[in-house]
Image: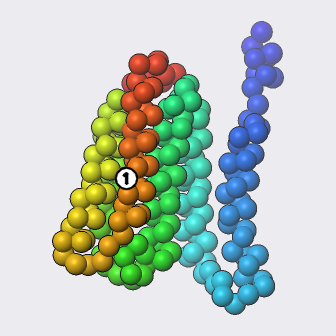
Amino acid sequence: MKKNRLLQFTWITPWRIVLWGTVIALLLLPLLAMQFTVEVHWTGFDFVAATALLGGTALLLELAFRKQNTVARRVGWSIAALSSLLLIWINLAVGIIGNENNPTNLLYFIIIITLILGTLLTRFNVFSAHHVLCFTAAVQVGIEVIIQYNDLGAAPFLTAAFTLCWLLAAGLLRQAISVPSSITN
């Protein structure tokens, strides 16, 4: 009986192939572009940072898909992970305010720290994560207010987009609270 169960379980699934294939493709894209144009110039550090960001996000997505048994929870955690990746990537690549060397951009890392610490402190509890994501949205708006009040620049469109992403993820997790999960909350 155990042998049949082991044979039915497989590590290779279509979503895993898409997930890790996308990570590999995104890492190979700049390498390929560097062969044809001088406008793309990544250093070894760029590849290490991209691998850490993309690989870490893919691991978070895989964890969400393995440990959560509802579509709403999976999508909620996925939106939170992908929004975090996008916020970090934009900030490191071109900067949100001015360029990537503008020290004001460091404020945006407070948002990511808030989300990471909040979810770790609440041990990924879905009900608590809902509150953490709502608080993260408030921090996002608060940072925009601080930046505009001090006339350091502005990124209202990005702030609105990320705030909506945090609130959408929070809403999906909130919706799934009444549905039991495969892990203990």
Residue at 76%, 39% in the rendered image: 14
158 to 43, vertically: above or below? above
- The residue that appears at 43% across and 75% down in the rendered structure is 95
Task: Report which residue position mark 1 lands on.
Answer: 163
Nearest the viewer among 57 and 133 is 133
Q: Quadrant of the C terminus?
A: top left
- Total marks placed: 1
| Residue located farthest toward the top when viewing the structure as drawn | 1
Closest to the observer, 137 or 20: 137
Residue 180 appears in view: yes
Using the image, determine if residue 175 lies above or below residue 129.
above
In the rendered image, residue 143, in percent from the top left (x then y), is placed at 26, 63
- 44 with respect to 147 (left or right): right
**Can you name the residue that lies furthest to the bottom here?**
38
Q: Is residue 117 visible?
A: no
Q: Quadrant of the N terminus?
A: top right
Q: Amino acid at mark 1?
A: Thr
Q: Nearer the viewer, residue 117 or 104?
A: 104
> What crowding class fits label 1: few (fewer than 14 Cα within 10 Å), some (14-19), or many (20 or more)?
many
**Residue for point 45% across, 62% down:** 87
For residue 41, above or below residue 77: below
In which quarter of the view is residue 15 placed?
top right
Q: In the rendering, at what x and y percent does residue 131 appear?
A: 30, 37
Residue at 41% across / 63% down in the picture? 158
Q: Position of residue 138 (x, y in %)?
A: 27, 51
Q: Is residue 48 left or right of residue 1?
A: left
Residue 104 at what x, y percent from top left? 30, 75
Vertically, is 20 above or below 182? below
| Quarter assignment of residue 70 | top right
